[in-house]
């Protein structure tokens, strides 16, 4: 029996100035799973993520996020979803904790242990240090903390490990696995680091020129394509055929 879907699109299209950048796109993300979203730069990943969050309206097609149409229920989708899209923006003169407190007030959420969330993402002993002094990796950790702090059901993360060192990448990998497997949070994440996607994703969607051309599990790739995910990805995005 098919599990309930947290995210789905059907024949999704998006046109900018007469150019169709998303074309007949179908995505299915089951609840409680990690979905890796991969493709070359400019393939349409960020555009689709913004549509899922209700930040852009589709031109045609159907979109459902936690059973809601994000274009019609934008605030509810944002309340139930944590997101990191492109470069995170903060109140630079404020501390990490103050930035998270403002986010909670905006979301109308209280009774959250902010220090615990900061510890979860590896931001400890930052105290009243203003965000303007944070490194790129620290800012990325704070962006993930902000996505988590209001206790969402779904995380949508665009390049969440960008700027992190190997230690930080490993820590985030373990965090994402814990969130999905132990807390039942659904995670959709895009990344150019294929080895990380391969390690944590239950299913991977490959997008080429605005179309999700394949959805497959890493296990299926390993069983049927011994050359591995990187070679599989290169053939998929170049329009070649893979031997399965």
Image: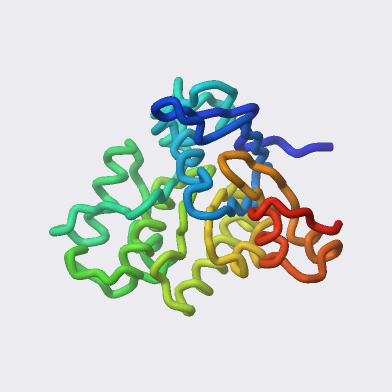
Q: Which quadrant of the structure image shows residue 163?
A: bottom left
Residue 45, horizontal then vertical, whole percent: 51, 46
Q: Which of these two is toward me, 102 or 71? A: 71
Left or right, 107 with reference to 197: left
Residue 194, horizontal then vertical, whole percent: 60, 65
Q: Is residue 18 above or below residue 181?
A: above
Coloration mode = rainbow
Looking at the rendered image, the quarter that the N terminus falls into is: top right
Q: Which quadrant of the structure image shows residue 241?
A: bottom right
For the point 45% across and 47% down, the residue is 151
For the point 33% across and 38% down, the residue is 107
Q: Which of these two is toward me, 130 or 49? A: 49
Q: Which of these two is toward me, 244 or 123? A: 244
Q: Which of these two is toward me, 99 or 74? A: 74
Q: Which quadrant of the structure image shows residue 17?
A: top left
Residue 172, horizontal then vertical, whole percent: 50, 67
Q: Is residue 178 above or below residue 65?
A: below
Left or right, 5 with reference to 41: right
For the point 22% across and 55% down, the residue is 98
For the point 36% across and 56% down, the residue is 143
Residue 73, horizontal then vertical, whole percent: 45, 24
Outermost residue on the left side: it is 93
């Amino acid at each position: 029996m098919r599990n309930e879907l947290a995210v789905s699109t059907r024949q999704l299209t998006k046109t900018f100035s007469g150019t169709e950048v998303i074309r007949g796109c179908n995505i299915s993300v089951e609840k409680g799973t990690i979905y890796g979203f991969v493709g070359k730069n400019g393939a349409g990943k960020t555009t689709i993520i913004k549509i899922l969050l209700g930040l852009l309206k589709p031109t045609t097609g159907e979109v459902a996020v936690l059973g809601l149409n994000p274009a019609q229920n934008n605030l509810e989708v944002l309340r139930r979803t944590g997101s990191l899209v492109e470069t995170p923006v903060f109140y630079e003169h404020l501390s990490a904790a103050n930035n998270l407190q403002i986010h909670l007030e905006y979301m109308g959420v209280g009774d959250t242990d902010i220090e615990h969330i900061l510890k979860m993402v590896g931001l400890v002993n930052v105290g009243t240090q203003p965000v303007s002094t944070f490194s790129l990796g620290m800012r990325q950790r704070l962006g993930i903390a902000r996505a988590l702090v209001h206790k969402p059901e779904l995380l949508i993360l665009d390049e969440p490990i960008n700027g992190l060192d190997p230690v930080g990448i490993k820590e985030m990998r373990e965090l994402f696995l814990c969130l999905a497997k132990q807390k039942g949070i659904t995670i959709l994440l895009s990344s150019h680091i294929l080895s990380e996607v391969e390690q944590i994703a239950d299913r991977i969607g490959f997008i080429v020129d605005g179309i999700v051309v394949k959805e497959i599990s890493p296990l299926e790739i390993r069983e049927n394509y011994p050359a591995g995910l990187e070679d599989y990805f290169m053939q998929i995005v170049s329009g070649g055929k893979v031997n399965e």
